[in-house]
Each structure stands twice: as structure tokens, then as C-alpha cells.
Image (cartoon, rainbow, N blue to C red):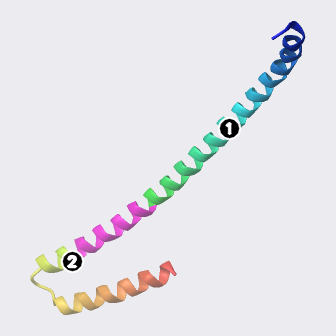
Amino acid sequence: MNVAELGTLIPIIALCIPIVAIWTKHRQKIAEMQINATAELSAEKAAQYAQHTRELEERVRVLERIVTDKGFDTAAQIEALRRDSVSLEDRRV
């Protein structure tokens, strides 16, 4: 490589450095945005799972109460629960 070729490559390399820096910064911002989007989606799903778990726990508590309470009419309580669950489903829609 002679001096003329080397003299031509120096400005080209000098111009490539800022381009690579800008491209790297852009890729970093895109990666951060993807991470934030994934975190928000995960948080939303976790909240949905927590709500579903609370609903299931409440249903189990009611069933345990029905099974352990001796003095009440079980069939009437089951029918009342059916009415409650239908009204809950209506509220969700």
C-alpha cells in the first residue's frame, strides 16, 4: 500500500467512525424499547393471572364454607352461587 492509497483511506475511516457510533446508539435504543415493551406485557399478564387466581381462591373459599357448614341447605347455596357466577360473567362482558 503506498502513501496515496493510505491518504485516501484515512478520511474514509474518519467518516465511518461517527456512522458506526450513530448506528450503535440507534440499535441500543431499539433494544431498550423492546425490553420495555416486553416488561409491560409481562406485568399485564401477571396482573391478569393474579386476578384469575384471586377469583379461583374466592370460589374455593365459598365451596369450603358450604361443605363445612352443617346447618344450611346445600342445594340452595349452590343455586345462589350459580346465580352469583352468572352475574359475575355478565359483568365481565
Q: What residue is pinned by disc 1? A: 27
- The vertical placement of 27 against 10, above or below, is below
Prevailing SS of the magenta stretch? helix
Outermost residue, left side: 70
Give the distance between the C-alpha atoms of the residues marked 1 and 2, in whole angstroms: 54 Å
Mark 2 highlights which residue? Answer: 63
- Residue 43, image x, y percentages: 49, 53
Check if residue 64 falls in the magenta segment: no
Residue at disc 2, secondary structure: helix
Instruction: Find residue 42 and report its horizontal and vertical position in percent.
Output: 48, 53
Residue segment shown in magenta:
48-63
Q: Nearer the viewer, residue 40 or 85?
A: 40
Horizontal arrangement in the rendering, residue 63 relative to residue 44 (left or right): left
Foreground residue among 27 and 7: 7
Look at label 2 and name its amino acid.
Answer: Leu
Quick check: 15 above or below 40? above
